[in-house]
Image (cartoon, helix red, strand yellow):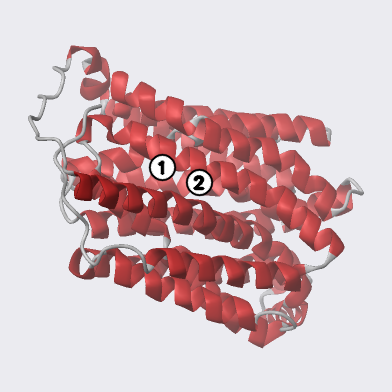
Amino acid sequence: MTRDRIDFLFLNIGHYLDHLFTLIFATVAALALSREWGLSYSELLKYATPGFFAFGLFSWPAGWLADKWSREGMIAVFFVGIGAASIATAFAQTPLQVGIGLFIVGVFAAIYHPVGLAIVTQKWKNTGMRLAMNGVWGNLGVASAALITGYFIDHGGWRTAFIVPGIFSIATGLLYTVHQWREVSTAHQKAPPPSVASTLPGPDMKALMLRITAIVFLTTAVSSLVFQSTTFALPKIFDERLQGVANDMAQWLAASGVTAAKGDVATMLGALTFVVFAVASIAQLVVGSLLDRLGPRTVFMIVAAMQVVFFAAMPGLHDAWALAAAFGFMLGAFGQVPINDFMIGKMASGEARARIYGVRYVVSFTVFALALPMISFIYGNYGFDTLFRLMASSAAVIFIAVACLPAKLPQPAAAAA
């Protein structure tokens, strides 16, 4: 394997682990702690909220530090720091201690997106496909959180679901540091990037850039609300809507000779969540290919339309029909993920790219955090059907906003850092 491929593999593993760690608690809360600690699902969600605020608020400082110091060094800090924070969270004895642990996890989780995506968009060509491949790894981390945590709940307890990935992440971080030691150790010696002479854009170009920027940040906020609401709540949605399918699967496997499957409903629900997330992540590969060929406007409108249709169909559905609708709206939710990153990568200057991604993810992950109390309120007062209707309306807002994008993105000169 060439050094270039190893670099990309490490970045992909980082994206996988970033989403894995931030969603372990979603399954723990839905399938274990609500029973073990005698707290409702809605009550437990508030302890995850500070972690998602940290996930957003620390994105800009992480991007700034990466641009000023070393992007590779920050990725090494990410691997080791988030692994240690996850292991520490496993030893929590109270909900407050879990909340503190998740906050520290969020601080280190904030590093990956502004730094890792800046490396991906600057280092390689075919930006759309590279972002899509990297995005698939992140989606598999989302999916694996439910699968791995569901398994450990049935075999060893929820604390193990924090410890084992934590050890793996620290080991990966040490390997990455050795692999990138030359880049990390000489970061302060790097020459500043050459300045790019450019003429000031005319008023028409300024107006167009302002419109595109407004659309990027609006769709970033709304699509983040949709993505966080679906990925975080799906284990609980499946716990309510797919009990029949999960019991049938467990009984079928037990009858087939898999004795460990008998009664493992949490594992089955985690497996179903994993399958939906894993299949939906394939949409990003299709989207990445289409972005390089068609541009973001057409592709974004297609995935937004998919979400409108399937979210609107979901209320009242159970078992097989609910599973089918979930496949549909998750294909759209996952498919939209690389589109805004593609637009920023094409339009942002290279020397400031990590900082610009940092601002984008401050918006994105702040909305992530706000989504949790929203889910708690809606679920506690109205149930998930109301959440699905809200998600359908949100997807419609995205569709209308994206329709205002130009057919082809402008290619401005490099902006000042």
Look at mark 2 in the image and give the residue it sits on.
Answer: 364
- Check the picture and name the quadrant holding the C terminus: top left
Which sits earlier in the primary sequence, circle 1 or circle 2?
A: 1
- Camera-side residue: 242 or 199? 199
Residue 53 image offset from top left, x and y in percent: 61, 36
Residue 101 lies in quadrant: top right
Name which residue type carries label 1: Gly
Question: Horizontally, is 173 left or right of 243 in the view?
Answer: left
Residue 298 lies in quadrant: bottom left
Furthest toward the right, the residue is 38
Could one spot residue 279 in this view of the protein? no
Q: How crowded is mark 1: few (under 14 residues within 10 Å), some or many (20 or more)?
A: many
Residue 191 image offset from top left, x and y in percent: 13, 17
Question: Horizontally, is 301 left or right of 69 in the view?
Answer: right
Q: Nearer the viewer, mark 1 or mark 2?
A: 2
Residue drawn at point x = 40 percent, y = 55 percent:
215
Determine whether 155 is above or below 22 in the image. Answer: below
Residue 42 image offset from top left, x and y in percent: 82, 52
Query: Distance between the Cα atoms at labels 1 and 2?
Result: 19 Å
Name which residue type carries label 2: Ser
Look at mark 1 in the image and give the residue it sits on.
Answer: 14
Residue 220 image offset from top left, x and y in percent: 46, 52
